Amino acid sequence: MAAIVFDLDGTLISSVGDLHAAANRTLADVGAGALTLDQVRGFIGNGVPKLVERVMRAANLPVSPDNHADMTARFMAHYEADPVSLTTVFDGAREALEACRDQGHKLGICTNKPQRPAEIVLDLLGLAPLFDVVVGGDALPTRKPDPAMLHHALNLLKYDQTLFVGDSEIDADTALAAKVPFALYTEGYRKRSLDKMNALFTFEHFTEFTSLIARTLK
């Protein structure tokens, strides 16, 4: 049996719609124009503070420490008020998680999304009972790709055999830094080419993941 830790946004859920909506509500608060869905999609991955900074720069807003703190607080308020109206679980992901648990594996989340909204989203989508550990982006002083978050999640799960599952170059770099095998979901928010992702295996649908796990982990 193993400890399998998953990234959240872009790996298990498609959350860009709600992140986009929260970003545009935040911009509307200060009289700035809206951004496109594709723009915001490109900003996902490094946590909320970096996303907000990128949104501000794209909207030609000044990025001072005070302005950034204010906009981040506004964004978080908008996002937590309505986090799953436009968010969906990727097809087959729920069933794959259930199959992993049935096989005796322990499951965790390691996400740059802050702890509170990560837990809210998991709860509202009915995924929370499937996970033994959730480590959010503000749980430790550092975020991915620093390996500390992943190490922390795996230490809490306490299994020798491990796997990290993600969708982006940030996740790949985290796994490499943590010296943990990496599985890549190819349909998320990745910008780097597949041959540079250092993946033990890749999959484009969670039905493939279930069979790959059965062959890879014991």
Image: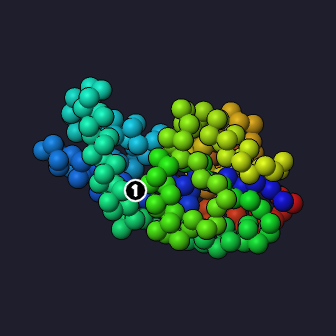
Image quadrant where one finds the N terminus: bottom right
Q: Residue at x 12, y 44 (%)?
A: 31
Say above or below: 209 vs 189: below
Q: Is residue 211 visible in this depiction of the protein?
A: yes
Name the residue nearer the viewer: 85 or 124: 124
Q: Secondary structure at mark 1?
A: helix
Name the residue nearer the viewer: 67 or 204: 67
Q: Residue furthest right?
A: 218
Q: Is residue 37 visible in this depiction of the protein?
A: no
Q: Please provide percent x and percent y for residue 155.
A: 74, 44
Q: Amino acid type of disc 1? A: Val
The residue to which callout 1 is attached is 16
In the picture, residue 101 is in which quadrant? bottom right
Image quadrant where one finds the C terminus: bottom right
Q: How is the image coloured?
A: rainbow
Say above or below: 181 vs 147: below
Q: Is residue 211 left or right of residue 110?
A: right
Name the residue nearer the viewer: 208 or 5: 5
